[in-house]
Image (spheres, coloured by chain):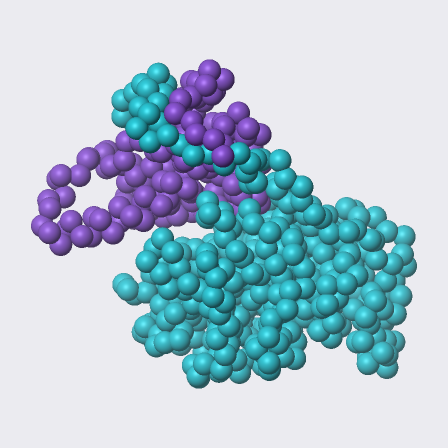
């Protein structure tokens, strides 16, 4: 075992090059009241705890998968916290606001938001998106289909 | 999708980025306060170097356990007559095969189950082992809704219980929300109806099927000619919490949409009592025995972060007969329940979830539960393995697996895990006809 208290130069360069991509997926997958940078930081810390970033075969994919998993876990935790806070009479207005038409997207689970983002915005092939989310290509395709159906249904409800 | 794209792009750029430099400073500050103890060991994970064991491939020459062949020998002449009478009589059948074969039809292939499957968005009918494949639905034609730019496919099983028809989905229809297509055992198109969802909801008597018409709001009950016999509307409180399809009750009088049971006759949906209310009514996690007297389902309890799962065998009345549960951490999960034709065994995927929560990363196991003894045995261990159906005699299993990027194909093996054979590569959506000679 070894102890480490700093990031070496190679890792520094790697983080710098990956940061924009990591932050974007964190912003998409994370709950609206979580700072995307906090998710990226947590994912990096957890990964560093397991070994040097440079040991990873595909650090972007590994870190993005970790970010999405963290987002999913935090969404569950936040859901419980929100319920508890509501019981304590916290006002809804204390929570960050967002455009009304974005709600249909935010209602999707983090992994579904992430797969839609990767495929629709980054134009990633399903195989690549699947790798970044830790699933099979077929599972990614199915999840994207589900996300589209669910978002369409939500948009129809929102639109009356 | 342009609308989705705009919203997603906006979402991805929300907030004020701190920048890579500040992030690194934060991490180094954390490291200075709390140095990491790093195990000097290369971590095994999906995205790191990993050697995956693949099933050994041996192309079958013929079916190795033809119990139905001997039993049904008397019927051979009649079946053969039907076979030759119907083969190649469809003007919409394109005679191209993804797995060309020169094996001529023989006694075994004539009375063994047909294999229906999807490959690259097209639908094929083949012998039980993938031989003599004929494309019966072409995603390049307009007949199956390809104007919406989507291939045919689906999830779960395809064949009706009596083996006379099979069905699959496409994303056609207006406005491209989905369609269900039904074909007979010769591959002829019988009906196309609008419908959204994933699995095909065949009624127990094979005369009807159920599908979402409007996702999570209305359910259409259709007869085989495509006529809608009922439109069921979910009431508030009955909206399912996941991506699930209507599941028929064994008596065919209602469909289950957890947490409610919706009568086909138009009666008001009722919230179901335990244990049905525990069941997530997806074909992955609940399965009725072939005679409809028992049900296998998965229950899961937990606080949202951790969970504890059990596989339950119960009478149709709800009386629990067996609870299969393993004490381990993390708790394994059970998926893809498949009954044997005689109801004496249940196949399931044993999924030991990874620490990252990825169900598809782990080396999963296909296990067989002996309903009488309550003992489960591992048949095969492959990433993403799941059973699709037993052969009609219960001696072989149709299954699929995932590799790191896709389905490896449709496979077959004996119920003890021996004689593993690849039937069709590069697809995971296919099904054996439950009763050979149903056509």
- Residue toward you, B225 or A138: A138
Q: Residue at x 82, y 79 (%)?
A: B72
Q: Quadrant of residue B62?
A: bottom right
Tint of chain A? purple
Where residue B128 sits, quadrant-wise, is: bottom right
Tell me the residue at 83%/75% (across/down).
B69
Q: At 49% from the left edge and 27% from the top edge, which residue is drawn?
A: A53
Q: Please provide percent x and percent y for residue B249.
A: 47, 75
Chain B shade:
cyan
**Quarter occupied by the C terminus of chain B:** bottom right
Left-right relation of B227 to B118: left
Taking the image as shown, residue B202 lies to the left or right of residue B62, namely: left
Whether residue B125 is visible to the viewer of this picture, yes or no, is no
Q: Is residue B144 left or right of residue B91?
A: left
At 69% from the left edge and 50% from the top edge, which residue is drawn? B409
Give how far across and how far down residue A22 sits, in percent. Answer: 41, 27
């Amino acid at each position: 075992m070894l102890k480490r208290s700093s990031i070496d130069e190679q890792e520094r360069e790697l983080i710098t090059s990956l940061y924009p991509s990591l932050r974007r997926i964190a912003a998409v997958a994370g709950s609206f009241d979580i700072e995307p940078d906090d998710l990226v930081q947590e994912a990096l810390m957890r990964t560093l705890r397991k070994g040097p970033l440079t040991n990873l075969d595909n650090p972007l994919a590994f870190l993005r998968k970790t970010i999405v998993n963290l987002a999913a876990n935090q969404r569950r935790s936040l859901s419980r916290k929100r319920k508890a806070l509501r019981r304590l009479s916290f006002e809804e207005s204390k929570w960050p606001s967002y455009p009304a038409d974005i709600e249909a997207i935010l209602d999707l689970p983090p992994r579904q938001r992430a797969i839609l983002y990767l495929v629709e915005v980054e134009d990633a092939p399903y195989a690549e998106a699947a790798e970044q989310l830790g699933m099979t290509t077929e599972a990614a395709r199915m999840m994207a289909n589900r996300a589209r159906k669910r978002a369409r249904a939500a948009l129809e409800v929102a639109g009356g | 999708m342009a609308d989705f794209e705009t919203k997603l792009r906006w979402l991805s750029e929300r907030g004020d980025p701190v920048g890579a430099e500040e992030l690194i400073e934060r991490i180094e500050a954390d490291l200075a306060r709390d140095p990491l103890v790093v195990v000097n060991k290369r971590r095994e994970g999906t995205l790191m170097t990993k050697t995956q064991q693949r099933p050994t491939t041996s192309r079958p020459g013929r079916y190795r356990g033809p119990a139905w062949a001997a039993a049904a020998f008397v019927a051979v002449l009649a079946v053969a007559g039907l076979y030759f009478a119907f083969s190649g009589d469809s003007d919409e059948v394109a005679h191209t095969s993804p797995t060309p074969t020169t094996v001529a039809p023989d006694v075994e292939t004539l009375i063994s189950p047909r294999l229906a499957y999807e490959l690259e968005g097209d639908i094929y009918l083949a012998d039980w082992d993938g031989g003599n494949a004929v494309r019966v639905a072409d995603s390049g034609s307009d007949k199956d809704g390809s104007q919406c730019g989507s291939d045919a496919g689906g999830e779960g099983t395809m064949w009706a219980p009596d083996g006379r028809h099979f069905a699959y989905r496409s994303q056609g229809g207006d406005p491209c929300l989905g369609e269900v297509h039904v074909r007979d055992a010769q591959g002829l198109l019988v009906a196309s109806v609008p419908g959204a969802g994933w699995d095909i909801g065949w009624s127990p008597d094979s005369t009807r099927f159920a599908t979402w018409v409007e996702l999570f709001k209305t359910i259409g009950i259709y007869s085989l000619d495509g006529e809608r016999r009922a439109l069921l509307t979910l009431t508030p409180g009955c909206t399912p919490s996941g991506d699930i399809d209507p599941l028929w009750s064994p008596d065919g009088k209602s469909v289950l949409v957890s947490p409610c049971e919706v009568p086909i006759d138009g009666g008001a949906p009722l919230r179901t009592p335990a244990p049905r209310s525990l069941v997530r009514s997806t074909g992955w996690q609940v399965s009725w025995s072939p005679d409809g007297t028992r049900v296998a389902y998965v229950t899961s309890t937990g606080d949202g972060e951790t969970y504890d799962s059990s596989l339950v065998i119960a009478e149709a009345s709800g009386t629990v007969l067996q609870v299969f549960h393993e004490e381990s951490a993390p708790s394994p999960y059970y998926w893809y329940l498949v009954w044997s034709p005689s109801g004496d065994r249940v196949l399931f995927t044993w999924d030991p979830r990874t620490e990252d929560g990825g169900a598809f990363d782990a080396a999963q196991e296909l296990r067989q539960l002996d309903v009488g003894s309550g003992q489960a045995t591992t048949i095969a261990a492959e990433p993403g393995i799941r059973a699709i159906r037993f052969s009609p005699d219960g001696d072989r299993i149709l299954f699929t697996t995932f590799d790191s990027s896709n389905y490896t194909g449709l496979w077959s093996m004996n119920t003890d895990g021996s004689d593993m054979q690849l039937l069709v590569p590069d697809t995971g959506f296919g099904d054996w006809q439950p009763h050979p000679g149903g056509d």
